[in-house]
Amino acid sequence: MSLMTSWVAGANAPDCDFPLNNLPYGVFEDGKGARMGVAIGDYVLDVGAVDHRLDPALFAAPSWNAVMAAGPEVWAALRARLIELLGDEAHRAAVEPGLVPLAEVALLMPFAVTEYTDFYAAKNHAFNVGSMFRGPENALPPNWLSIPIGYNGRASSVVVSGAEVRRPWGQLKAPDAELPEFAPCRRFDLELEMGAIVGTPSDGMVSVAQADEMIFGYVLLNDWSARDIQAWEYQPLGPFQSKATATTISPWIVTAAALAPFRISTPERERELLPYLSEPGPMLYDIALEVALAPEGGEEVVISRTNYSEMYYSAAQQLCHHTSSGCAMRTGDLLGSGTISGTTPDSRGSLLEMSWGGKEPLALPGGETRSFLEDGDTLTLRGAAQGDGYRIGFGESTGKVLPAVPQPDWIKD
Amino acid sequence: MSLMTSWVAGANAPDCDFPLNNLPYGVFEDGKGARMGVAIGDYVLDVGAVDHRLDPALFAAPSWNAVMAAGPEVWAALRARLIELLGDEAHRAAVEPGLVPLAEVALLMPFAVTEYTDFYAAKNHAFNVGSMFRGPENALPPNWLSIPIGYNGRASSVVVSGAEVRRPWGQLKAPDAELPEFAPCRRFDLELEMGAIVGTPSDGMVSVAQADEMIFGYVLLNDWSARDIQAWEYQPLGPFQSKATATTISPWIVTAAALAPFRISTPERERELLPYLSEPGPMLYDIALEVALAPEGGEEVVISRTNYSEMYYSAAQQLCHHTSSGCAMRTGDLLGSGTISGTTPDSRGSLLEMSWGGKEPLALPGGETRSFLEDGDTLTLRGAAQGDGYRIGFGESTGKVLPAVPQPDWIKD
């Protein structure tokens, strides 16, 4: 696959996130109301304003859920028509009025999140966290090589890039304290993840192949995590309020179709998977990822570089397992991959790992250090699949940490 | 509080679940389309068909979500108007055409579940389960007396009374096996719970008092649980597929207003609660509960009797804690109380406890025994608050266990 050229300005530059090969879907607002858009070069195309040849009802609400629910034939028809309209100069006059400069729009939530599930399915992350708490010999839980471990998260926590994130309050218990206190989180962290979005629903068990076909697209995902709240609350039923403050996603849904040339297989298995989880083909993707941190008023610095290919389980395997008990999946369900860490210290997907539980603070330029996030820090995730002379970019996903709210007056001292 | 009399047949009988004091909200279907209804005596009133004096848009969809979102003033106005219409004989002629015999209707989901959270907040249940696995000295986890422990469940699993429930498949690992297998669950269980329904939304931390005002009403809830799937999957991130097969709720939402005379306080604390969780008044309810089991073709037998007052944390405390990290709550969020067990063997809320992990099978009439549920078993939950000469009943919540689906052909042996 090579670059597909477009007549839209900026779309053919090798470092453009949004060439014609990509066509990611978002929702934008330019002062004339929120609408469904597709990113192309330096512009966003108002999809509802062009001759898309599909049911206009699909573009009536500022959300991609209706298109997602319409299924793979509609997805393919829309993509083919957009390639025609934006690739062929002959359509320029008709289409150009629907282009709005990206620099002039605000990007909103691209879809309504129905339910949110988060996984724990990148081996280096699980190994790092397990090593910290149980030593390297017992790092992976006994079920880890058999189950794409997941837990249900909170859909109401999902926000789009740009939303500011308030440091949460919670129950914290210092290791040497007998009892917990209720206080603002002191170990607030990021988690670098990818999110997979369920397009077509299911009712009952589906195979890995069927699950793969249900996935509409992918976003970058930051699963903000309160490590001190988590440490005290998570036994025996898992993380709860530690993960409920915010989950930031990138504003553009990069479709499975755009990522198709970048499919790769999940890694060799130490333990053979149960047959229901075996993959009929490559269902993971080669997507380079990075995390950048900018202290308040300071320079941004990249603190981690890793790749989605570090996953031990693909989103299709996770989704298949999610349906194994008969659990119904619905349009708009969001599946977080789990934190994606590589094998080296500079490829870790959380500050918990980068600072090894706070014991080895990360040095930032200018002499600052970070064990966990400070108020005012802005985090930016970026990701792209690199093709031959073009790339499929996800754009940026940012979030700034705001100080905790003051103590509410109904919390007596 | 004593019986409020109604002119509707059956409503004044002391053993009627639905006197004028109750007025629970549901959705019914009688061959003329699904509509919003209120149970009264032997009838359901088609609420949209009477002069309710509220915005008709609140009754346009067959779901109580719009009314729930409208807030406490609308809830109070609707209840007052229904008491007027159904209590005063003068309205009989105008209202009677809107009454449909309960025996002639099917009851549907009363509201759309936005997100579902399940707690672990009745002490006897936590103590029983903990004793089985860790011995009575270490039964309660260290955080149990401080946190109303909860985990996010799966909203798509929630079904209404009457829905049949398929025994799930899942990863199971026998204690003496080295590796798991993928097979139908062998330890399928019930959990007797109450569900609290969020009416008005919140964004940010709320107090226990504010949380109490957000709750629209309560239902009976059976959190079907696959114990063998749970045992293998739940470390370290909590229950996932073991709880995702089905969650059955009763069809009538009994409002907080109807239950107000039955408020009681949560129990004395062994460990003082953190101030944010302290209750400004009684926020738990005295509601008698029972579970009945009927084998296929056999007689029903009551296998447990307990009371909602066995809870250590009220729904208001659970909801307050749920918002403590800033987690937004929305209209239609459902909070399961956690399994409600009393102190005696005949008041336990799950077969896991009744059969003590399968070691002491429960004897049923006719010589059958149960360690866990068998295919064909029908479970029925019932609940009522007992007043002076009347009761606030929840009706019944039933579910029958169907055999697992055959092995899908895409699961190779």
Image: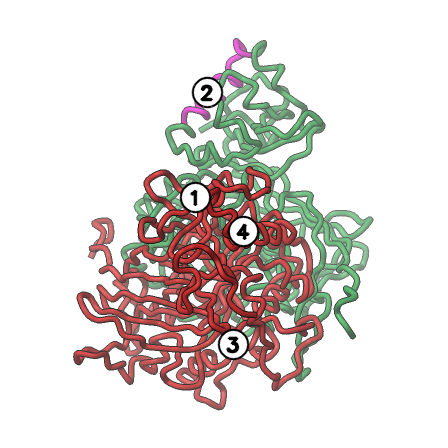
Chain colours: A red, B green
Q: Quadrant of residue A128?
A: bottom left
Quarter that holds the C terminus of chain A: bottom left
The amino acid type of the residue labelled 3 equals: Ser
Q: Amino acid at mark 1?
A: Gly
Dot 3: chain letter = A
- Dots 2, 4 in contact, CB < 8 A: no
Element under label 2?
helix
User: What is the spatial separation of the Cα atoms under label 4 and label 1, in whole angstroms?
Assistant: 12 Å
The x, y position of residue A162, in whole percent, is 32, 56
Q: Report crowding for label 1: few under 14, some 14 to 19, many 20 or more residues within 10 A (C-alpha).
A: some
Q: Amino acid at mark 2?
A: Arg
In the displayed structure, B264 sits above or below A373; it is: above
The reply to whether the C-beta atoms of the residues labelled 4 and 3 are less than 8 Å apart is: no
Residue A50 image position (x, y, % from top left): 50, 42
Residue B15, position as x, y percentages in the image: 61, 31
For residue A361, which quarter of the picture?
Answer: bottom left
Q: Nearer the viewer, mark 2 or mark 1?
A: 1
Mark linked to residue A98: 1
Closer to viewer: mark 1 or mark 3 = 1
Question: In the structure shown, which secondary structural element does the residue marked by tag 4 occupy?
Answer: helix
